[in-house]
Image (tube, helix red, strand yellow):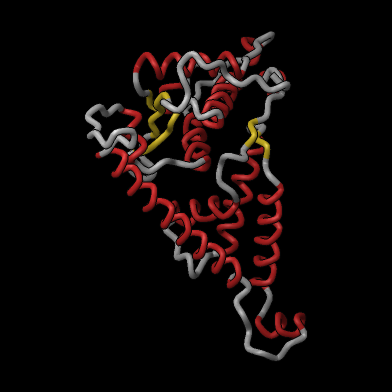
């Protein structure tokens, strides 16, 4: 059975709430422990394109800015491959050669500074909120698992994609004949994930996927997880970079609040 049939409604997740191309590049630099001032452009371009392919493969709605960054990386890569004297000749200048990566590095450094500053501000606000209730200035004594998650570093889409690749790699092979007529619904999987997290309090990301399930069902479960994140119904976090991902129910929405139902459902 074709993957499109397994995805039931040919569903797409809107990625507007997730980070953009600079975040993906910073994620790759952090994961590979690269020097942000000396990026191996061929290596990072290959990995960036692989993540774009992943997002398309899982029917994620890739914004145009990701495509623009892909084109930028390809241009930088091609210029890096040219001998220095030929670069100068093509650009029609005799001045000292400028590293083609320079503008990209400047963008990444400035964006990283912005993210780090925003993270520190968030930590300060969480500390203040932990100690005082803004309504009456009373100390807050109740603390839930979701509160604890707020104080930890949140993860991004690329951590989820990496973890999901690991899940797919562990899947058992299910004969194609067993999948005939199978259809898996994103809304149904969303309900199941919410029920599981509310019942257990928190669930490991990998435990949301049954190793005996067909690949199509596992992909639909992942799309349901992303949609719940978009609707602020769950929280995902890690105790440390590249550790196991934990999924918690969010307190932002009441438990009885209906899920959004876009037309494509």
Q: Position of residue 85 (x, y in %)?
A: 69, 85
Which residue shows up at 31% across the image and 39% down it?
Answer: 129
Q: Is residue 87 above or below residue 16?
A: below
Q: Can residue 210 be seen in the rendering of this structure?
A: no
Please, is residue 220 above or below residue 76 in the view? above
Residue displayed at 29% across by 33% down: 136
> In the shown orientation, is residue 178 left or right of residue 122?
right
The x, y position of residue 93, in whole percent, is 73, 87
The number of callouts visible is: 0
Q: Residue at x 36, y 37 (%)?
A: 150
- Residue 231 in picture, x, y percent from top left: 55, 28
Specify whether 198 is left or right of 160: left
Q: Is residue 250 visible?
A: yes
Q: Position of residue 65 (x, y in %)?
A: 68, 51
Q: Nearer the viewer, residue 24 or 201?
A: 201
Please, is residue 2 above or below residue 66 in the view?
above
Q: Quadrant of the N terminus?
A: top right
Q: Nearer the viewer, residue 115 or 193?
A: 115
Q: Residue at x 59, y 22 (%)?
A: 220
Name the residue furthest bottom: 94
Snapshot quadrant of residue 140: top left
Q: What quarter of the picture does the C terminus occupy?
A: top right
Q: Is residue 146 above or below residue 84?
A: above
Q: Quadrant of residue 86?
A: bottom right
In the picture, measured across the screen, residue 154 lies left or right of residue 13, that is: left
């Amino acid at each position: 059975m074709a993957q499109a049939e397994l995805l039931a409604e040919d569903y797409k997740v809107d990625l507007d709430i997730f980070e953009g191309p600079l975040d993906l590049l910073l994620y790759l630099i952090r994961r590979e422990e690269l020097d942000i001032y000396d990026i191996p452009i061929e290596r990072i371009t290959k990995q960036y394109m692989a993540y774009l392919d992943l997002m398309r493969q899982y029917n994620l709605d890739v914004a145009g800015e990701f495509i623009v960054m892909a084109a930028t990386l390809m241009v930088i890569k091609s210029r890096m491959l040219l001998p220095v004297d030929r670069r100068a000749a093509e650009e029609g200048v005799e001045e000292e050669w400028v590293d083609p990566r320079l503008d990209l590095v400047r963008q990444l450094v400035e964006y990283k500074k912005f993210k780090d500053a925003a993270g520190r501000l968030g930590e300060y606000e969480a500390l203040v909120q932990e100690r005082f209730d803004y309504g009456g200035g009373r100390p807050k004594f109740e603390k839930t698992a979701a509160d604890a998650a707020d104080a930890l570093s949140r993860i991004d889409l690329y951590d989820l994609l990496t973890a999901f690749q690991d899940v797919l790699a562990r899947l058992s092979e299910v004969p194609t004949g067993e999948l005939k007529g199978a259809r898996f619904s994103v809304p149904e999987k969303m309900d199941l994930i919410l029920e599981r997290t509310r019942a257990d309090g928190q669930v490991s990301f990998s435990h949301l996927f049954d190793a005996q399930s067909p690949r199509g069902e596992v992909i639909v479960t992942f799309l349901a997880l992303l949609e719940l994140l978009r609707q602020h119904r769950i929280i995902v976090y890690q105790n440390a970079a590249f550790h196991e991902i934990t999924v918690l129910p969010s307190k932002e929405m009441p438990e009885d609040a209906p899920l959004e139902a876009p037309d494509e459902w």
